[in-house]
């Protein structure tokens, strides 16, 4: 409930901020310009919403599979979808070495869940099920749609900024432009915050479906470890898609410094005892807390600590 309350508050704040900006512009200039900007932004987002699945499929080299191709993976997704009470999503394999998973689609009925070729090599069955449960939860919560719709708010602010920067009525236009730019920065931070909340929400959803939160914590550790062995070029090649991933690959090397302490027997996996032991002792530094503000994913230590608290 606390996760949901924070998510609802952030969404309400976003729309309140953009509404205040449009009211200010309407007061100074009349209704035409802000309404035009809002309509233009929504048209752009609508186009993005319509074509985004094809963009993701092409950029991530996705090939969809059936039960006969990979019965274990397909069966896991089918079982998790039934538990989550959502329609069976398409199941795909992304032909990239970066170990990760992602969910996307225009709606819960158009849902697609993909795992990368790299992920198939490193997880055991419990860990894979936990990661797939995380992605199923994204579809169940419809948060892909929420993020798509919320992305319109910074976009409106950015369009208003450029429109009014060189306005004819210099003093009023300049004031509006700088206010819009400030709101653009603020709303981007709020969208990132919502993105982090949805990851916590999906972690909780995976735990609720699989009843094994420690398996997801182990999977996060495995993914982080495996990512650090990849060349930086391969990590950077997927930089534009990292908001879709279960973890942030660009932070893997920094995260592993702290996570290594969790693997007490050095077997490359985390069991329930190791997760709880690590959670009771690990602390997130002040620097990491500040850096998290600029990230689309929560701090991985904080995620493991929250997973350890679930039963």
Image (cartoon, helix red, strand yellow):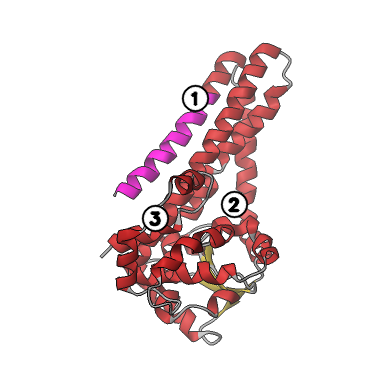
Q: Horizontal and vertical percent for residue 280? A: 30, 60
Question: Which residue appears at 45% of the width and 58% of the height?
Answer: 300
Query: What is the distance, in whole Å, between disc 2 and disc 1 at their CAs?
Result: 26 Å
Q: Horizontal and vertical percent for residue 305? A: 34, 59
Q: Which residue is mark 2?
A: 49
Tell me the mark number nearer the camera, choosing from 1 and 3: 3
First in sequence: mark 3 or mark 2? 2
Q: Is mark 1 in CB contact (under 8 Å) with mark 3?
A: no
Quadrant in which the C terminus appears = bottom left
Q: Which residue is mark 3?
A: 302
Is residue 176 rendered magenta in the image? no
The disc placed on residue 237 is: none
Residue 8 falls in which quadrant of the image? top left
Is residue 18 rendered magenta in the image? yes
Tell me the mark number nearer the camera, choosing from 2 and 1: 1
Element under disc 3? helix
Structural crowding at the residue carrying mark 2, measured as other residues with C-alpha within 10 Å and reported as few (<14), some (14–19) or many (≥20): some
Q: Is residue 69 above or below residue 214?
A: below
Q: Horizontal and vertical percent for residue 238? A: 65, 61
Residue in front for this viewpoint, 261 or 26: 261
Residue 233 falls in which quadrant of the image? bottom right
Question: Which residue appears at 39% of the width and 55% of the height?
Answer: 302
First in sequence: mark 2 or mark 1? 1
| Residue bounds of the magenta highlight | 2-21
The rendered magenta stretch, by its main secondary structure, is classed as helix
Residue in front for this viewpoint, 194 or 111: 194
Q: Which residue is mark 1?
A: 20
Q: Is residue 2 visible in this depiction of the protein?
A: yes
Question: Which residue appears at 47% of the width and 36% of the height?
Answer: 14
Q: List the single residue furthest toward the left.
A: 311
Q: Is mark 2 in CB contact (under 8 Å) with mark 1?
A: no
């Amino acid at each position: 409930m606390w996760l949901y309350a924070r998510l609802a508050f952030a969404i309400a704040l976003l729309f309140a901020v953009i509404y205040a900006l449009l009211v200010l512009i309407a007061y100074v200039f009349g209704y035409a310009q802000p309404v035009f900007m809002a309509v233009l932004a929504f048209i752009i987002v609508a186009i993005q919403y319509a074509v985004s699945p094809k963009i993701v499929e092409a950029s991530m080299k996705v090939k969809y599979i059936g039960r006969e191709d990979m019965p274990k993976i397909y069966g896991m997704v089918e079982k998790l979808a039934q538990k989550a009470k959502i329609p069976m999503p398409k199941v795909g394999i992304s032909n990239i070495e970066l170990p990760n998973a992602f969910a996307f689609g225009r709606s819960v009925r158009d849902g697609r869940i993909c795992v990368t070729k790299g992920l198939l090599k490193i997880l055991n069955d419990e860990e894979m099920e936990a990661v797939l449960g995380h992605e199923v939860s994204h579809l169940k919560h419809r948060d892909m749609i929420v993020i798509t719709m919320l992305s319109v708010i910074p976009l409106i602010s950015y369009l208003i900024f450029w429109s009014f920067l060189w306005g004819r009525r210099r003093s009023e236009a300049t004031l509006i432009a700088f206010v819009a730019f400030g709101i653009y920065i603020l709303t981007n931070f709020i969208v990132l915050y919502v993105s982090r909340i949805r990851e916590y929400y999906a972690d909780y959803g995976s735990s609720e479906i699989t009843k094994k939160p420690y398996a997801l914590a182990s999977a996060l550790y495995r993914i982080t470890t495996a990512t650090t062995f990849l060349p930086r070029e391969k990590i950077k090649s997927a930089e534009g898609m990292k908001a879709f991933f279960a973890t942030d690959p660009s932070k893997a090397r920094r995260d592993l410094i702290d996570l290594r302490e969790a693997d007490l027997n050095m077997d490359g996996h985390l069991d329930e005892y190791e997760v709880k032991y690590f959670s009771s002792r690990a602390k997130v530094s002040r620097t990491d807390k500040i850096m998290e503000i600029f990230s689309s994913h929560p701090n991985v230590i904080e995620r493991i600590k929250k997973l350890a608290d679930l039963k």
